């Protein structure tokens, strides 16, 4: 396989394994953070009824989601960019200096 095919496979794999869970984490974090700001909402975050706990989970989910969404973008940029070609090496002798 050539480098472009490997780059496409790596980009698709990280998109599925990191990008999709990242989007879910981002959305759920936003829902948790929004629910913590609604007065009178019934919040149950793993046994805690504290809205600050929901806000903490929401902010953590948003941060984790952002990191997971950025990973496939970076992999795609690094794997699919065109790298500059090295200058050809010449075997010709250098003329003597005058």
Image (cartoon, rainbow, N blue to C red):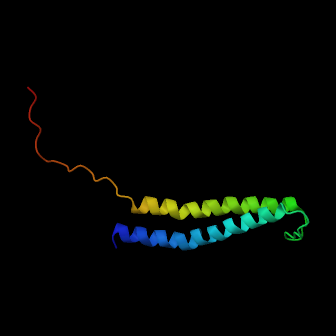
Which picture quadrant has residue 64? bottom right
Residue 91 % position (x, y): 13, 47
- Residue at 56% x, 60% y is 70
- Residue at 73% x, 65% y is 29
Q: Residue furthest top?
A: 98
Position of the N terminus, as image quadrant, is bottom left
Residue 82 % position (x, y): 35, 58
Judged left or right of residue 25, residue 45 is: right
Which picture quadrant has residue 49? bottom right
Against 12, is 52 above or below? Answer: above
Position of the C terminus, as image quadrant, is top left
- Residue at 9% x, 32% y is 96
Residue 50 % position (x, y): 90, 62
* Nearer to us in this view, 52 or 89: 52
- Residue at 19% x, 49% y is 89
Residue 15 % position (x, y): 53, 70
Judged left or right of residue 49, residue 17 is: left
* Nearer to us in this view, 2 or 51: 51
Which picture quadrant has residue 58? bottom right
């Amino acid at each position: 396989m050539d480098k472009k095919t490997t780059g496409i496979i790596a980009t698709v794999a990280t998109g599925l394994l990191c990008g999709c869970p990242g989007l879910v984490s981002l959305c759920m974090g936003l829902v948790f953070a929004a629910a913590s700001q609604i007065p009178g909402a019934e919040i149950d975050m793993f046994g805690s009824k504290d809205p600050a706990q929901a806000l903490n989970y929401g902010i953590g989910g948003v941060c984790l989601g952002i990191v997971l969404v950025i990973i496939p973008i970076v992999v795609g940029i690094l794997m699919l960019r065109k790298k500059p070609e090295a200058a050809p090496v010449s075997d010709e002798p250098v003329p003597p200096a005058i």
